[in-house]
Image: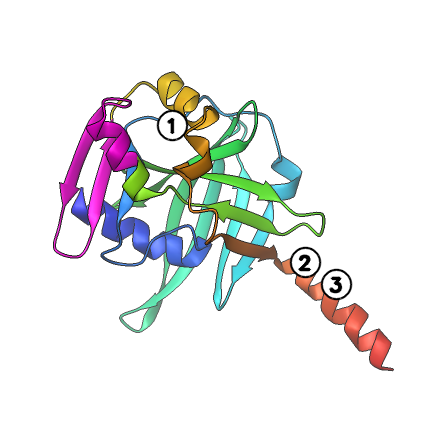
Amino acid sequence: MHGAVLRQGVLLTALAILFSCGCSAVTVKQPLSQPAAIDKDKFEGTWVLDDAAVGIRFSDDGVAQLAAAEWKDGKFRLNRAEMILTKGKEANYFSLRGEEDGKWQQEYLFAQYTFTDQGALVVWMPNVERFAEAIKDGKLEGTVRKERYSEIVLITSPPQKLLEFLEGPANAEAFSYKHPLVLRKLSSLAKAAEASAENQE
């Protein structure tokens, strides 16, 4: 799994949901649900965080396809991921996995998300410590592996049980709400730049 987390790191740097090398992570064996028909128009486009950009489009089966370019070994390399949206009772989530050597990875990252009134995408990653505690306390099934500088939590509970956990009282601390990732759509940034230029004329 360590290699998978490293690979996800490349993608998450581009999406910003994608972890940097060596970070702790919470993963699942299955997506949280079948693809939900929500937020397609809001997601589709090119998203930017700092100097990274990722393109998102939806295939006919409702699964979102993500692509981001990475400069490596003197040339651009295309990294791909797929994302499945889940509509909860109180919040919405996505499950995401990357592609490695032409094959989809076996485990998914997941996160809670929302959109601001201005169209920005706000993402909250799981609180690794809280999920490790949930496994230790028997609230969820899974494994916790401590490495030198990180902790890898793999949840093996059925998706419905995990969703019930996320939708319950545990949600108050299930995600890193104090440290959201905020992505902005390239088209929105362009419109803002145009408006700013007009105001300066």
**Against 38, is 75 above or below?**
below
What's the residue at 52%, 51% (across, down)? 55
What's the residue at 60%, 57% (across, down)? 184
> What is the image's colouring?
rainbow
Question: Residue 31's mark?
Answer: 1
Horizontal and vertical percent for residue 49? 51, 61
Horizontal and vertical percent for residue 32? 41, 26
Image quadrant for the C terminus? bottom right
How busy is the neighbourhood of tag 3: few (under 14 within 10 Å), some, or many (20 plus)?
Answer: few
Horizontal and vertical percent for residue 87? 54, 26
Marks 3,2: beta carbons within 8 A: yes
What's the residue at 26%, 49% (across, down)? 24
Amino acid marked by disc 2: Ser
Marks 3,1: beta carbons within 8 A: no
Marks 1,2: beta carbons within 8 A: no
What stretch of residues is rendered in magenta? 131-155
Element class at badge 1: loop
Horizontal and vertical percent for residue 102? 28, 43
Amino acid marked by disc 1: Pro
Task: Please state if 59 lies on the left or on the right of 190 as rendered.
Answer: left
Residue behind mark 3: 191
Q: Earlier in the sequence, mark 3 or mark 1?
A: 1
Q: Alpha carbon of mark 1 to alpha carbon of mark 2: how far?
A: 29 Å
Residue behind mark 2: 187
Q: Nearer the viewer, mark 1 or mark 2?
A: 1
Element class at badge 2: helix
> Is 136 covered by the magenta stretch?
yes
Q: Alpha carbon of mark 3 to alpha carbon of mark 2: how far?
A: 6 Å
Please tell me in which quadrant of the rendered image residue 135 appears: top left
Q: Alpha carbon of mark 3 to alpha carbon of mark 1: how far?
A: 35 Å
Task: Please state if 118 lies on the left or on the right of 60 as rendered.
Answer: right
Amino acid marked by disc 3: Lys
